[in-house]
Amino acid sequence: MSERINSVIMPMFITILVFAIAYVVVWEWMICRIYVEPWEILYINSKIGSENPNAETDRVVDEGIKGIQKKIYGEGRYFINPIVNDCTVQHINRFSARIEPLQVGIVESRSGANPLQGEFLVSSDIKKPQKGVIQEPLTPGIWRLNPHAYEIKVSNAIKIEPGYVGCVVSQAGNPPSENRLARPGERGVMQQILNPGIYYVNPKAYSVLKVDIGYRQTSFEGINFRSKDGFQIEVDITVVWGILPDKVPYIIERFGNVDDVMDKIVRPQVESLCRIEGSKYGAVELIEGTSREKFQDEFTEKLVDICESKDIKALLGLVRNIKIPQEIRAPIQKSKIANEEMNTKKELQKTQISINQLEKLKQEVFKGIQEVQAITAKEEATILADGERQVAAIRAEQQIEVAKLEKELAGIEADITRLLGDAQAQAKELKRRAEADKLVQEINAIGGPEEYTLYNFTLNLNENLKIFIRYTGEGTFWTDLPAGAKTMESMAALKILKGKKDKQQPQIEEESEEK
C-alpha cells in the first residue's frame, strides 16, 4: 500500500518542483523581470480592473482601476506580469527632474478636476487632485513624478542681496479691500517684505520685486523759474532721498517701482518747490550768501514734509548752482569786485600797521630784555655778597659754639674720671670688706681661729692618705676614737664640734645665772 502511495506522490512532487523552478527561472526572471537603471522611472498601464469613472479628467488612476497607474517606480529590480500590465521605462526628463541648488521647481498637474473659474493655482492634495499649477514649489533635490499626471519646469530661486528687500506681489486670490495691502490668500502687493536671503518661491504664485533701500543722491539740472522781480533764473539742485524697508510695499502699491517714485513724486515736487520758493526772492537776493542759504533751507523743509506724507524719506535739498541773467550779474560782480579790492586795501593797511606795531614791540622787548639782564646781574652780585657775609658769620658762630661745647665736654670728662676713680676705690674697699666679713663669718661658723686652721689643714690633705689604727690598750687616744671617725677629715670635724660644745656650755651657764 505504501509503495502505491509513494508511486503516486513522488511524480506529483517532481512535477510541482519542476513547475516551480520553471516559474521562477523562466517566468519570473526571464519574462516578468524589469530592471530600472539610475535616472530612470517606471510607470504601469494596467489592462485589467474596473473602468475609470472620470476618464475625461483623471489621466492616472489608483490601483484596481484600468489605465495608467498613479504609482511610479525608481531605479531597482521589479517583477511585473506583462500579460495584464504594459510597463514603460523612461529616462528622467522634464516630468521627473533634479532641482539644483538655487533653483525651484514649478509643478503643473494634468490630471484631476478642473479648478474654479478664474483660478489657476491648485493644492497638492493627492486625494482630491485638480488640474493647474500646484501652489507649493519643489526645492533642490531629485523628484520623480508620473509624466502622465505632472509636468515640472525649473526656475531660479529668489535671491535678495544686502541693501535690497523683496516686495511680494501675489498673483492669485481675491483682491483686497480698498486702501489696504493684500493678506495671505489675496491678490496684490503684500505687506510682508523679504529681507536679504534666498527664497524658494513659486514664480507662478508670487512675483518678487527687488527694491534698493537706503538713501540715494539725485541731481536735477536746469530748473527754471522767475524771480520776484521778473528775471529768469536757472538752478541746479541735488536731493538726498530714500525708501525705508517697512514703507516699500505701500510705495510700490501707490506709485509702482523706484523709477516711478522718481518720476511721479521726487522730480515734480523739486521743480514745483523751486518755482514756488524761488519766486519769493529777487535775483540779487539769490546771489547773496545769507538769502541763498535761507532759500535752500526753506526748500529742504518743504520737500521733507511732502515726501514724508508719501512714505518717502528726504534728507537734504542742496542748491549747487544759481544762474542769474548777465545784465544783473555783471554790475553785481563789478560791485563785488570793487568792494573786494577796497576791502583788500583796507586789510593791507591794517596789515602794515600791524607790522609797524610788531617792529616797535620787538624793539621794546629787546630794550626790556637788556634792562632785565642788567638788573638781574646787579641782583645776583648783591645776593652773592650777602650770601658770603652770612656764611662767614655763621661759620664764626659755629666755631664759638664748638669751643663752648669742647669746654663743657672737658669738664664732663673730668667729672666722669673723678667719679670713676671714686667708684673704683669704693668698689675695692667694699670687696675687701666683703671678703673680710666672709672670712670672719666662716671662722665664727667653724668655731674659732683654731678650729678654722684645723679645718683648712684637713681640706689640704691628700685624698689617697690612709690611716691605720691599731689597738694598744686602754686609755689611749686611738681606743677612745668613735667608730664613725674613719678619716682624718672626719676626726678633725668631730674635734671641732667638741670644742664648740665646750665653749658653749659656760655661756649657757652664765646666762642662767644672770637670769
Image (tube, helix red, strand yellow):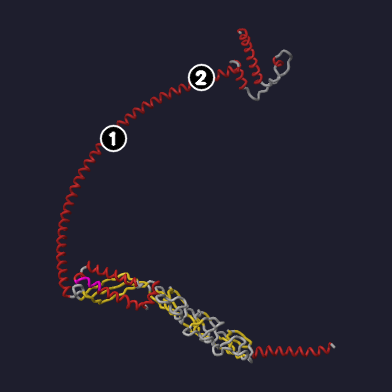
Kindly tell me whether residue 228 is visible in this rendering.
Answer: yes
Q: Which residue is mark 2?
A: 433
Mark found first going from the N terminus, 1 or 2: 1
Q: Is residue 506 magenta?
A: no
Closer to the camera, 111 or 351? 111
Count of numbered circles in the view = 2
Indicate the quadrant containing the N terminus: top left, top right, bottom left or bottom right.
bottom right
Q: Amino acid at mark 1?
A: Arg
Q: Which residue is mark 1?
A: 395
Closer to the camera, 123 or 403? 123
Q: Is residue 43 above or below residue 368?
A: below
For residue 4, the mark is none
Between disc 1 and disc 2, the foreground one is: 1
Kindly tell me whether residue 152 is visible in this rendering.
Answer: no
Position in image of residue 479 (x %, y %): 72, 16
Q: Is residue 376 above or below residue 23?
A: above
Magenta range: 276-283
Judge from the rendering whether residue 40 lies leftward or rightward of residue 181; answer left or right.
right
Q: Quadrant of residue 212?
A: bottom left
- Crowd around label 1: few <14 · some 14–19 · many ≥20 (10 Å): few
